[in-house]
Image (cartoon, helix red, strand yellow):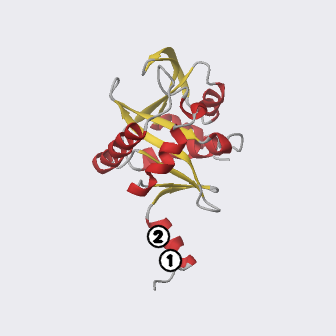
């Protein structure tokens, strides 16, 4: 009969897989057993409605394809969209990170939080910490982010973390407001004492 792993072993395992930590969140690498969580997240209309032209929830096959692509992207670039956990109890609350946006060849910051965790500042907390990861890893000298023009909550997050508005136009089949942040922007924000993580 095997014994359950000790709390110390569980904590060690979580830390080994952790890419980024904030005061309340952990960003970790995907494992095969995470597929059910990703499917649950994107099977909810509220979590998917602003992500594509039709706003339809993802199928299991679509979620598996996305997760496999993120694993490969991390292997290739050292950054991708990663699973987001609540630090105090390890609960899966969404995904966040960067992906290469094929239409422009730029890295794009993005996140999706499960609706039951909305309104708690998690999106701002992780989005505010991600630029540091991006620039510390020397991925590129800038990245973009965009949100559907009707997605007021995400637009507010992008502005709150100090991203600069660029233009409004079609992105990924959506009418979106597009933002950017450069390394110089990040340095200026830090010099001004602006801290996005809450």
Q: Which residue is mark 2?
A: 13
Residue at figure coordinates x 47%, y 70% from the top left: 13
Question: Which quadrant holds residue 120?
Answer: top right
Q: For mark 1, what is the residue?
A: 9
Q: Where on the picture, by quarter, is residue 65?
A: top left
| Real-space CA distance between mark 1 and mark 2, rounded to the nearest whole angstrom | 6 Å
Q: Residues within 10 Å of mark 2 (few under 14, many from 20)?
A: few
Which element carries disc 1, helix, strand or loop? helix
Callout 1 environment at 10 Å: few (<14), some (14 to 19), or many (20+)? few
What percent of the width, then of the height, locates residue 162?
59, 33
- For label 2, the SS is helix
Q: Residue at x 49, y 72 (%)?
A: 12
CB atoms of marks 1 and 2 within 8 Å? yes
Point 64% across, 56% down: residue: 24
Measured from the top left, where is residue 165 in percent x and y?
A: 55, 22
Vertically, is 131 above or below 49? below
Residue 196 visible (yes or no): no
Nearer-the-camera pick, 47 or 39: 39
Question: In x, y percent, where is residue 142?
Answer: 42, 34
* The furthest residue to the left: 76
| Residue farthest front in this picture | 1
């Amino acid at each position: 009969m095997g014994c359950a792993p000790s709390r110390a072993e569980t904590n060690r395992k979580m830390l080994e897989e952790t890419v980024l930590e904030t005061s309340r969140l952990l960003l970790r690498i995907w494992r095969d057993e995470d597929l059910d969580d990703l499917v649950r997240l994107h099977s909810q209309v509220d979590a998917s409605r602003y992500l594509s032209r039709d706003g339809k929830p993802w199928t299991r096959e679509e979620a598996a394809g996305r997760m496999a692509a993120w694993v490969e992207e991390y292997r290739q670039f050292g950054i991708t969209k990663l699973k987001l956990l609540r630090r105090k109890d390890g609960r899966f609350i969404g995904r966040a990170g960067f992906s290469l946006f094929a239409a422009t060849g730029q890295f794009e910051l993005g996140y999706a939080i499960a609706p039951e965790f909305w309104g708690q500042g998690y999106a701002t907390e992780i989005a505010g910490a991600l630029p540091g990861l991006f620039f510390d890893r020397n991925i590129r000298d800038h990245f973009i982010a965009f949100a559907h023009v009707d997605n007021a909550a995400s637009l507010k997050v992008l502005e709150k973390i100090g991203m600069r508005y660029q233009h409004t136009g079609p992105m990924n089949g959506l009418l979106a407001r597009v933002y950017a942040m450069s390394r110089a922007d990040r340095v200026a924000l830090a010099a001004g004492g602006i801290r996005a993580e809450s």
